[in-house]
Image: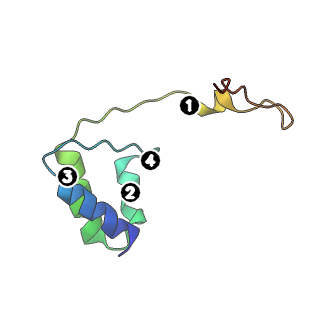
Amino acid sequence: MSQAGDLYELVSERQGRSLIITSNRASSDWYPLFPEPVVAESLLGRLINASHQVIMNGPGYRPNKRPRNPTEKIDKPPTP
C-alpha cells in the first residue's frame, strides 16, 4: 500500500477520536502529494471538517539549535 493509502487508513481508523498532525504545508498544498485526487479530497475532508487548526507564523525553533559554524558542537545535557 502507498504512503498516501497508509495515511488515509490511519485517519479513517482514528475518525471521531483524537489525532494530532503537524505539517509545514498548508492543507491546500497537500492535494498534489496524493496520487489519487479522490483519496486526497476524502482524507483532507475528514481532517479539516472536524479539526481545530493552529496556524503558527514566525521563525522556527530548530534554526536556533543549529551550530553557528560547521565546527561548533551543540551543547548536550550531561549523561547520568
Return the x and y of residue 36 as percentages of the image width and height.
32, 73
Amino acid type, callout 2: Trp
Question: Residue tagged by mark 2?
Answer: 30
In the image, what residue type sits under mark 1? Gly
> Contact (CB < 8 A) between labels 1 and 4?
no
- Name the residue beneath numbered marker 4: 25
Q: Which mark is residue 14?
A: 3
Which residue is rendered at x = 83% and y = 31% of the image?
A: 72
Q: Are marks 2 and 4 in contact (CB under 8 Å)?
A: yes
Residue that badge 1 annotates: 60
Other residues around mark 3 within 10 Å, as few (<14) / some (14–19) / many (≥20): few
Residue at figure coordinates x 33%, y 32% from the top left? 54
Q: Position of residue 28 (x, y in %)?
A: 35, 52
Quarter where residue 38 is shown = bottom left
Q: Which mark is residue 32?
A: none
The quarter of the picture where residue 31 lies is: bottom left
Q: How many residues crowd mark 1 within 10 Å: few (<14), some (14–19), many (20+)?
A: few
Q: Hey, which residue is sitting farthest front in the picture? A: 80
Q: Earlier in the sequence, mark 4 or mark 3?
A: 3
Q: Is residue 57 above or below residue 18?
A: above
Question: What kind of element bears circle 4?
Answer: loop
Report how far apart the C-alphas of labels 3 and 1 lie in the structure.
Answer: 29 Å
Q: CA distance from mark 1 to mark 4?
A: 14 Å
